[in-house]
Image (spheres, grey):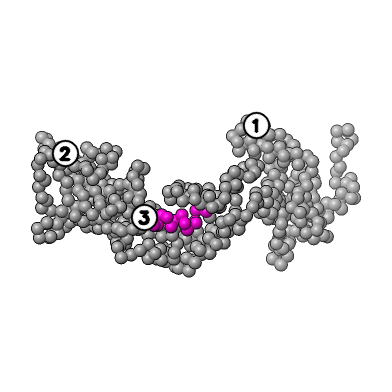
Amino acid sequence: MSAGTSDILIPDQEPAELARFREQWKAEVRERQAATTSDAQIEPVTGASTAAARAISPARSDASVKPATLTNSLSASRRPETYVVAGASTVTTHASHGQSHLSPNLARAVEVYRKAVFHEQHSQLDEALRLYRQAFRLDANVDRAYFIEEQRAWQERTVVQPVSHKKGPSTVSVGGVTRDVQKLEVHKDKSFVTSGFLAQVLKNFPENLVFEPEDEKEGLLPINLIPDELLLQILRILDYTTIERFAAVSRKARVLSLDPAIWRDFVQLAYKPPQIADDKSIANVVELYSSDYRRAYIEHPRLRLDGVYIAVCHYMRMGSSENAWVNVTHLITYHRYLRFFPDGQVLSLLANEEWQPQTVIPMLKPNLRMKGFYIGNWSLSGSTVYITNLVEQHPHAHATTEPQPNKYFFQMTLALRSRPLGRWNKLDFIGYDSVNVEDGEAVPLPLKNERSFWFSKVKSWAGY
């Protein structure tokens, strides 16, 4: 026999030990296959072995693959479990301690693979490709071993909570805020969905909260040195939009933003006549929402005073043509504007397409005088807006000319809606009447071409 074939053993010349090992291995494979088909023999797999078992591929019967033996003589909680990773190096996981031990070659391959993943995540594709190739040269099944290691590390993080950022107790009690909001869950009405969902979220918050950095290596954030009482005073001088954006930063920010003092200020500023009836108080409004000021401010109807409601309307008008075979149609666009003031005054303007919103809005003041400009009064009852005594303000041709008395005034009835919840940014026409000044007869006007008003915020206008 030549030197090149002297190391190859034919089946008849195999050592007796290797033959026994093969037969023992086949018997164990048959036992495992029989156990998977029998429901009585299935046992739940817990701990770190769960993630590893999902990545196990059946051992191949090729002689070049050396299978690892799974010994059942000791319990999994007191002895490491051994798995075969797709015919490559063996991965041993200690289920009791959450630790994994790889062979030196496979451990080095996994470390190179982890670096390649890091470079790929940072868009360094050339370096990532080089490291991927290096890792697979070290071990062909490094990707599966890496997956097992990541699953084991993830299970450790979910079981053991990190303690590096427990700097100190927060003066804001999560339990207290949760109890204040949870009482709304007993209601089945859809109007309680906002606070009810928020209470469910707060249940999962830990008791002691801090502002945690985006990178865990940064350590304590300077904002944690500010007392919660001072943070609440800062939040009370911000607008509600900024507060809600701040609340989306972290769990502690959300708890701080739920302080009743913040939303009590907003409710007291917003809900006063004519936003509510003269015979009602703020206490009556808040009682409708179980004394939750934040929910009352979000869900109770109110007209926005920090901007203008604009309706863009269109209609078709037939034109004339010299050619009998050609029909000319004009698309006419006009805008309606409504601006509300805290004292109950409302400004209404009807302007054609020559006056664009960016030109009209800065001029929309009580001293404006142009055709189609009206001044009236408004009141809010529930979600219905009543606009009365809309009188046209005629532009004066001469300063000495006395204005002619109006024979008619107008009144509107609008439905206040919110899309999405808490915006109160839409007004739908319910009725539009022309009223005779002499006899008070109201004549409904057609609403065929009228469209809904949508709110547009103006930064320079006050909201209260």
Q: Residue at x 10, y 60 (%)?
A: 439
Q: Residue at x 59, y 43 (%)?
A: 222
The percent coordinates of residue 435 (x first, y second) are 14, 57
Three-letter amino acid code at the position of disc 1: Glu
Amino acid at the residue labelled 3: Ala
Please report contact status of discs 3 and 2: CB closer than 8 Å, yes or no: no
Helix, strand, or loop for circle 3? Answer: helix
Question: Which corner quadrant holds the N terminus?
Answer: top right
- Image mark for residue 328: 2
Amino acid type for the residue under numbered disc 2? Val
The answer to whether residue 15 is left or right of residue 356 is right
The mark closer to the camera, 2 or 1, is 1
Q: How crowded is the residue under tag 3: few (<14 C-alpha within 10 Å), some, or many (20+)?
A: many
Which residue occupies the foreground of this view, 288 or 157?
288
Query: Depth-wise, is mark 3 or mark 1 nearer the camera?
Result: 3
Local crowd size for mark 2, using a 10 Å CA cut-off: few (<14), some (14–19), many (≥20)? few
Segment colored magenta: 256-270
Q: Nearer the viewer, mark 3 or mark 2?
A: 3
Secondary structure type for disc 2: strand
Front position in the image: 39 or 329: 329
Q: Is residue 269 magenta?
A: yes
| Front residue of 198 and 207 | 207
Question: Where does residue 305 sit, x and y in percent of width and height?
Answer: 32, 50
